[in-house]
Image (cartoon, coloured by chain):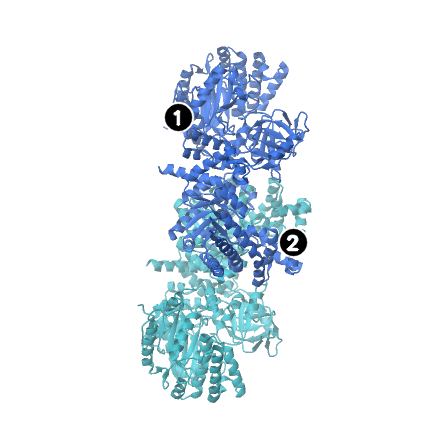
Chain colours: A cyan, B blue
Amino acid sequence: MARHIYFFGDGKADGNASMKETLGGKGAGLAEMTNIGVPVPPGFTISTAACVWYYRNGMTYPEGLDGEIATNLTRLEASVGRTFGDPARPLLVSVRSGARASMPGMMDTILNLGLNDSTVEGLAKSSGDERFAFDSYRRFITMYSDVVLGVDHEHFEHLLDEAKHAHGAKVDAELHATALRGLLARYKALVRERTGNDFPQDVREQLHGAIRAVFSSWNNQRAITYRRLNNIPDDWGTAVNVQSMVFGNMGDDCATGVAFTRNPSTGEKRFYGEFLPNAQGEDVVAGIRTPYPISKELAAEPGKSLEEMMPGVYGQLVDVYRKLESHYRDMQDIEFTIEAGRLYLLQTRTGKRTGFAAVKIAVDMVDEAMIDEREAVKRVDAGSIVQLLAPVFDAATKSKALANGRLLAKGLAAGPGAASGRVAFTAENAVDMAKGPDPVILARVETSPEDIAGMHAAAGILTSRGGLTSHAAVVARGMGKPCVVGCGAMRIDYSRKELRVEGRPPILEGDWISIDGATGEVIYDRLETRSSEVIQVLIDGSMKPEASETFRDFDRLLKWADSIRTKKVRTNADTPHDTRVAKLFGAEGIGLCRTEHMFFQEERILAVREMILARDEAGRRRALEKILPFQRSDFASMFRVLDGLPITVRLLDPPLHEFLPQTEAQISTVAREMNWGFIELRSKVSQLHEVNPMLGHRGCRLGITFPEIYEMQARAIFEAACEVSKQGIAVSPEVMIPLIGTIKEFTITRELVERTAKKVFEEKGIEVPLIVGTMIEIPRAALMAGEIAAEAAFFSFGTNDLTQMTFGYSRDDVGSFMPAYLEKKIVPRDPFESLDTEGVGQLVRLGTESGRAANPSLKVGVCGEHGGDPDSIRFFRNVGLDYVSCSPFRVPVARLAQAQAELEEVAKEA
Amino acid sequence: MARHIYFFGDGKADGNASMKETLGGKGAGLAEMTNIGVPVPPGFTISTAACVWYYRNGMTYPEGLDGEIATNLTRLEASVGRTFGDPARPLLVSVRSGARASMPGMMDTILNLGLNDSTVEGLAKSSGDERFAFDSYRRFITMYSDVVLGVDHEHFEHLLDEAKHAHGAKVDAELHATALRGLLARYKALVRERTGNDFPQDVREQLHGAIRAVFSSWNNQRAITYRRLNNIPDDWGTAVNVQSMVFGNMGDDCATGVAFTRNPSTGEKRFYGEFLPNAQGEDVVAGIRTPYPISKELAAEPGKSLEEMMPGVYGQLVDVYRKLESHYRDMQDIEFTIEAGRLYLLQTRTGKRTGFAAVKIAVDMVDEAMIDEREAVKRVDAGSIVQLLAPVFDAATKSKALANGRLLAKGLAAGPGAASGRVAFTAENAVDMAKGPDPVILARVETSPEDIAGMHAAAGILTSRGGLTSHAAVVARGMGKPCVVGCGAMRIDYSRKELRVEGRPPILEGDWISIDGATGEVIYDRLETRSSEVIQVLIDGSMKPEASETFRDFDRLLKWADSIRTKKVRTNADTPHDTRVAKLFGAEGIGLCRTEHMFFQEERILAVREMILARDEAGRRRALEKILPFQRSDFASMFRVLDGLPITVRLLDPPLHEFLPQTEAQISTVAREMNWGFIELRSKVSQLHEVNPMLGHRGCRLGITFPEIYEMQARAIFEAACEVSKQGIAVSPEVMIPLIGTIKEFTITRELVERTAKKVFEEKGIEVPLIVGTMIEIPRAALMAGEIAAEAAFFSFGTNDLTQMTFGYSRDDVGSFMPAYLEKKIVPRDPFESLDTEGVGQLVRLGTESGRAANPSLKVGVCGEHGGDPDSIRFFRNVGLDYVSCSPFRVPVARLAQAQAELEEVAKEA
């Protein structure tokens, strides 16, 4: 019989930090803290395996779990010196979820379990505080009824409000014991009325009910949504932590709080947290009361900090945080309770952080000799570093707005970056409005897990209540979105759909506001944003590196990554500007230059349209003659910027009708230019319509039926290359044929390119290096890769089209079913966002392996958008691709992700 | 050094019939005939390998070929008793192409080679016929100059016409020796003028020039086109036969002819051929003069047959044909020449035949104990038997047309079937007109290889000149097209674009005519066609089997095929009628029932449109309720016809907008019915538009987003199945989910179907067997087949969509590049017609193998249109598919093709 329960208490634990898979993050933290001597209330953890078993076996316990619970309960009673259900000195416990990955607020928790009509009297006596005991029982009945019995907590709150009204109490704390006793009777009557049964008095029944409820909450809708957004597998399950209660709400020598060992928003090395005196833990996380800071220097009013209010406990807490950070060698997110002046740690875990904080903490810890450079590279979520490139408000514009009195209010800066958008007051409205052209700022009194979809849709999040560890702040940080919380001056009226700050005009839904996640400012104006510090140093050159610590950290981290990674990073760029930016971000060449993007510019599109609509080859050639000088000068500029770095130029790919005139005015213009009748031209335009353009006359199919197009493009490339080469600048053109599905398509077009290049070399009296390869983006090309590789110098996987055709999904049309597919977990992630390694990945692997077998010198890369996705990059590294190519702003992400993939593989091999 | 030349003569040959790959069909036939004692002029064959080498090595001879030619020439001189280039007794030779597969008239031939200014005098003396010698030289100069020197034969014909005019000669034969001598001088002057050189006098130079020309003719445009249409690989190359000349044109005891050992159009066992007295072989094949029949009974005028004109030689010919047919055990196509009363065979090969003839000959030969039943099954080109199902003219309509005096003329019946269409006088016009809605009849004086494309486009072919072995007849037979040739009463005027028969109104291009390939009748009327005999017996029941020998042969052959094949044949059928027809053709169940085809009927489409446009699920369910009874009664009828045979029902597959109202009137009707505004509805319709519908919201994607649709369909199937089952009729429904790409799509929809079935079973109080499987038509499904097979009862490869997505070809849009792709051999055949076994085939194989590995009881079939293509069927048999499913009329093809695939495999394994 497998073991399902792990005890912790009395200075030692059955588990430890390495057992996250079994104990969940919270359970492993409790065990580890117990082991290293941090004060933790004793308790036990029911393993995730029990939860998985529960789901796989029709919601039943695994064999023996009942007995294990009983045994551990006895052990817990002994440790605490109280007995479960004992009317005199009752043991009370909390029952909390705890998965391998943090899912803040998504699953259920029950506190004060073990209270009933008789033990509540014992608690009153033993604590000497009747009001506290009754209030605890009231809270327990509310929570338990809501979570286990399915009686919505609103019903209880309604009764509570009535009682407060009846007794003239403004806040809960003003309800005296007698009033609470009466309220409890009404609570119990409500339960009887709603469920047909009395509120359970058997404390063991209470315990089992709570355990089952926590198991079940793994699959509530908001947990499912959260997992989907955070790529957490559904089959992990949650552990359940049953822990003896400590009370932060037994009086003024009690408190509860949360803290980070460093600032999770900026990474600053400063102990950073909040607490509420005389409160239970959930009060802080829920963000209902705005808490006080822990350290004196952050106190809003003198004396209002833990450091000042309980200096002894504060000292203990500082010792504990130092112990935890040096033990875990990472920034920790802790929860603590102070009961009658005694400190208890309830949780420690690696703290979530913004990209800014992740970079700074990793680099600082290297400097503090806590971790080495390889560890630092592993520490930063590769995707999160784009936050360091995200725009901030333009200083001048913002100053002007502030000078104009547009500051609405100031809240807590929950980072990162800045956002300007139209305000929405509900998650649903945010989702709807985000479908329009403008960004959306979601403004709520506080957010709750029900708001996840709206937060995802919004460009920024603003709340009037709650601290830096409130739901809004934690989730926004996870999403890398600008966020301002606890902006108490704001009153949001949901029914009127307006937001008011005394002395300011009301802000209605749809009005523009701007929030600065770095300062906490909320401005009722639409503000322009400007480059982040990293961009100012690296790209704009408007700031010196010495002036930006952020840039220096970013740069050091990426240089460490470069020293680890073994594969190249290129960029997808079609203009000299993008090429320059990408080079500054560290791109080692261009992996995809889409020549057709050059076609759309004003002065060219007319010639392009003439080319498409030409009656015959001669007409096409006349039009192509006009396009040639444009393309040649584009390529020449690119070659100059690249200064010898390779550039993969993809010949014309999209269906020709994409370039066609659409409006009647456009058709008229082209008709005049071509000397055609309007009617005739309009009919020709409609004749070029395709039923499924994605699978139609495009890519090399155009190059074969109209070879003069590819001939012109090849000529433009090589004329430019020769010209630049004559100026003493090295050039390295790689011509890529798109949409190859058969070997003959490749050999025919390759010969055309080579023949044209040779002609140009003869005309110019100079030769430049030349290689011709192909995109692998059609399933058949991957299947026939061996044959094709024997003739090709390189492969570049076009994973966008390969995904479209392997799944049979049109990227333009998936909107009608993809949301349902993600919801139902039919696909784990959108396959256009992160490569489907199981299916499409088979073709990438097969294509690479059979290609290399036929041609050992074959260069293989990827130029689909997956080239900038860390999970996909890991897969490409493991398949052995020589490089990934991604958009310029994803180049740093790719550098970091490649290094991480390398470290993972090295670890696996070791 | 490999041997390149094989000699034949003096009663024995270096080669034999089994060496077709090396010697080509003609060379192997000449060798074999020599070996079995048939009189053949001696000669030698240069192997196909030499031709392949020639192409692979920049048009040069392989090493040693020169020497081998010299050696064999010496041997030939000894055999014939004449010397090449000898002024006294010159050896003359023919140089002919001869590939593995017959390519009639596609490549070049040169006769009378070895003649020059001096040997022509020797020929005159040794033959005692000066006119004959000069005429032979004239012919040789024309042919050689045309083929080798590139001087078009028209220039020579122009000079010939001038000479005839000058000498008052009506036909060539009236030009006397002196006139010819003068003409020869003008011919040689023409050559000098056009080429800058004298006509070659060195006979060895002539020989090498001719050999190179024959090699080169393998790649002339018409040969390439012919190979493409007939699926002959480009890399086979041609052999070259150098053979001593015999002359059918040396006087009235000379003749040349061609014959079939049985009738190639009907299969009738009757020696069947034509000859021209005093002519060279090319005159017959070219169809310029209408020849006489060989046997007396077919003579148009008394005395005008070989039997009557040369009874001795006729007797020899009959002996030879019996010897050849019993030797080859198949119908032979022979060419012969009679020189001075002596018979020489110049060629024998297996004769091309119509589907009718193929079936009859195969069955007859079994009855004659020449071959066994297995051999008979191998003998019939599986695709050709659809000819036996092709319509013929309705007897009553035709009688009426004849009674009305609409018979235009009568020609030779070159079979098979009948056709009615608009007449076209050039191949180009036939191709153009065939793009319109009506069929086209190509009418020509005679056809030539340049007309191939027009013949392919036409529904029937008519010529005014030429016999049953003329180009038109041979090619039409190969294509299985109705054909009437040698209709001498017709005069076609190309310049006026009209066809005239004395006493009848002129027929202009575009007028309707009808031709009966079974009777030779040409009728100037549009005639209705009616069922063939096989259809009358099998489907219509309007003819008794005893009355139709064709039916009985067809039936016997297919029953032999059934006893050989090990895999099943199902049909794609959506209506009870098609199901009944397919069963009569031998279908063993339905492999694909497309439920959406049931949606289009008048009274249903409105409900379908309501369903699609419904505002919500409730609206959809209301509309589905209306559709349910229709679907249920459709399925009930199908079950009754099937009587226990399995039926694979595919749930709704196409994108919903395919069913949408298109015209304003249709939109109005639906708007009224649904009580919507017109504008609102039109906007909803346009909102459902997709960019790439093939890759859009269709198949199981609909079933998942709108489960009520699949639920209704499952209900209809099972309600019908229960109803029919209660009547004591066995039912075997197999529900197929379309467009599966992920395992979850399958499990979700399978559960929906099973849940619905269970509900219906409970309601009806009866259960029927039920299995659920999936189509494999998305590349990812084939890649993930193992995972999917673990949950599915069967796979059916949807090779149409699988081909679309694996190639990235939209079937609706390939028209813009597929012709160029076939032309350039980028794809060997249209992949929608015959499965791409190399690429798409990999996915079929992978899907089958990994599916079976995961689920050994998995049933696997195919339901794309490839299920009726013999080459594809062979592939499916070899991959191990349990069945193919094809359209009802292809069921007999599939039965035969499966048996043939089986026999091939057995032969390979042996």
Sequence-wise, which precedes: disc 2 or disc 1?
1
Determine which quarter of the picture holds residue A127.
bottom left
Mark 2, secondary structure of its residue: helix
For the residue marked with disc 2, what is the amino acid?
Answer: Gln
Chain letter for mark 2, please: B
- Report the residue marked by disc 1: B16
Mark 1, secondary structure of its residue: loop
In the picture, the quarter occupied by the N terminus of chain A is bottom left
Tell me if mark 2 has few (under 14), some (14-19) or many (20+) residues whose alpha carbon lies within 10 angstroms of its own. Answer: few
Front tag of 2 and 1: 2
Q: CA distance from mark 2 to mark 1?
A: 71 Å
In the picture, the quarter occupied by the C terminus of chain A is bottom left
Tell me if mark 1 has few (under 14), some (14-19) or many (20+) residues whose alpha carbon lies within 10 angstroms of its own. Answer: many
- Report the residue marked by disc 2: B666
For the residue marked with disc 1, what is the amino acid?
Answer: Asn
Q: Position of residue B128 (x, y in %)?
A: 51, 10
